[in-house]
Amino acid sequence: MGTDHTDASEGGRGWVIVCVLSRAAPERSFRIHSLREVVVPEGARSRTRMMTEMKKSRSLSQVVMAVGAVAFGWMVTGCSGPECVDRFDCQNSKGAPPAGKQYVCEADTCVVKDVASPNPGNGSDAGTDAGTEPEPDAGTDAGTEPEPDAGTEPTACADLPHDARLGTLQLQPGFTVVESAPLPASIGAITSVAGASGSYTVYGVNSDKSVYALGTWPNVAASTTPLFPVVEPNGPQDAFVSNYLASDGVRLVAGYTRADLSGKVAVHDTVTNASTYLSAKGNFSAVGLDGAFLLNGLALEGVSETGSAVYALKTQSTPFSVSRLATFPVAQSASGFNALTTNKIVVLGYYGGNNVLHAVSPETYAPALAAGTSLDLADTNTPRIYAGSDLFYAAGFGAGVALHRGSYSESYEQLTHDVSRIALSPAGSDGKGVTAGDLKAVLTQSNNTCTSVVAMAPLAEDLLVGVEDKNGRRLVRLHAETP
């Protein structure tokens, strides 16, 4: 019933393998070397995504979690922290770079450099001189002077035209830009919560490990008053904040992990202003339903079963009730991404060589959620809708799911290639299956990587996309037109 989209290009996994057991330089603690190394938790970096088959050691936003490390028998070793692992670490500690500049992490140190596209400019003579110096004019060019080689030097991002809202990203047919607002420099994961009269409040996780209310859309601005800390009072100082923020309509959930994969989730009630902290080993991602959160991780306080799975945290009453909602089809799997569509289909993911996403209809997951039983994502009613090594993040976008995809540079910086969407709808006479549409491009960036997608979250039927380029950071609201 579902279309399985696969992509073999290199890209991300929210894991990072680190700390070689026999390393000679302990300060180089965040690089991949062998399977005998340790997985650092979600949050160890500033922007995490997933690792590609042990070829890349990067992560996209807060790093990694997890999961599956136990299955491989990896051992935890001591790691000392460098000043930075990637440019996002520099941004979090130093703030936004000057216009036309970017932070680069070199030798674990933050360095300011010019922003440049990794691709050539217009490439009009690309490679015709094979890199040799131009010979004296022998008449072959009718007497004109040789033109400068337009294909040997990249065009600086500062010299490329940038749209005021999308930068160098190109909006594709079938989608429109509704409006935009500034995105504060220190904000990572975001979410929106419906309010009165069709309003939406935007919340964000700040680099100080607290959650802030950023205002009612589109009047978004930085705040100086934290709503709640992700790490409990007197909690660990070595916590890494996970790259998610979700809402069940009343409560917000965020989480953190540590180097040994232990961690907690913070559930904050926006009405009573009270926060509850529960142990949640390896919490990697989360999505909110009406009265519940689905946590992708290794364990959840109160659930006897452990291991890489999707755990349910039901919030309609206190104390909260918990269960293991879904298990993954492969034995040695790691946590992945969760998302929710406006027609209540949940997207549940895992990593098993590629980032894999399955879609589950409410007619299938609601009974299991209510009864506290588990689903097997190998079931025919939970089709695999995507598999690829290029996935950085997933978020609900109307009656579908948006995918942020890309690759890594040689220095393991995330390079945004596109944001695409898969439409999802219930299938079958009982509505227990799911039909997946084609993978459709929303935003593309094929000739340069001068604009980065740094956040995604649903807002009503639309998608909020956080973008960053030479002109700063913005939240852009995108709408999918009705076919």
Image (cartoon, rainbow, N blue to C red):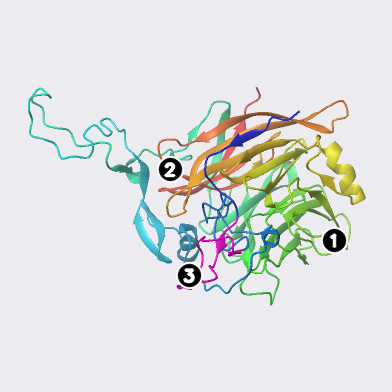
Q: Give x and y (percent) for residue 175.
A: 57, 30
Looking at marks 2 and 3 on the same chain, the residue that comes earlier in the sequence is marked by 3
* Residue under numbered circle 1: 303
Q: Mark 1 to mark 2: distance in Å?
A: 43 Å
Outermost residue toward the bottom? 234
Disc marking residue 82 = 3
Q: Amino acid at mark 1?
A: Val
Q: Give x and y (percent) for residue 267.
A: 76, 61
Q: Give x and y (percent) for residue 382.
A: 78, 37
Looking at marks 1 and 3 on the same chain, the residue that comes earlier in the sequence is marked by 3
- Under circle 2, the secondary element is loop
Q: Using a 10 Å C-alpha cutoff, classify the residue at mark 1 as few (fewer than 14 neighbours), some (14 to 19) or many (20 or more).
A: some
Q: In this rendering, would 410 be left or right of 228?
A: left
- The residue segment tinted magenta is 15-40
Q: In this rendering, would 464 be left or right of 368?
A: left
**Marks 2 and 3: which is nearer the front?**
3
**Marks 1 and 2: which is nearer the front?**
1
Q: Is residue 303 magenta?
A: no
Looking at marks 1 and 2 on the same chain, the residue that comes earlier in the sequence is marked by 1
Outermost residue toward the right? 371
**Residue 383 sits in which quadrant?**
top right
Q: Is residue 357 above or below residue 300?
A: above
Q: Give x and y (percent) for residue 148.
A: 19, 36
Q: Using a 10 Å C-alpha cutoff, classify the residue at mark 3 as few (fewer than 14 neighbours), some (14 to 19) or many (20 or more).
A: some
* Residue under numbered circle 2: 449
Nearer-the-camera pick, 418 or 216: 418
Quadrant for the N terminus in the image: top right
Residue 417 in view here: yes
Q: Amino acid at mark 3?
A: Pro
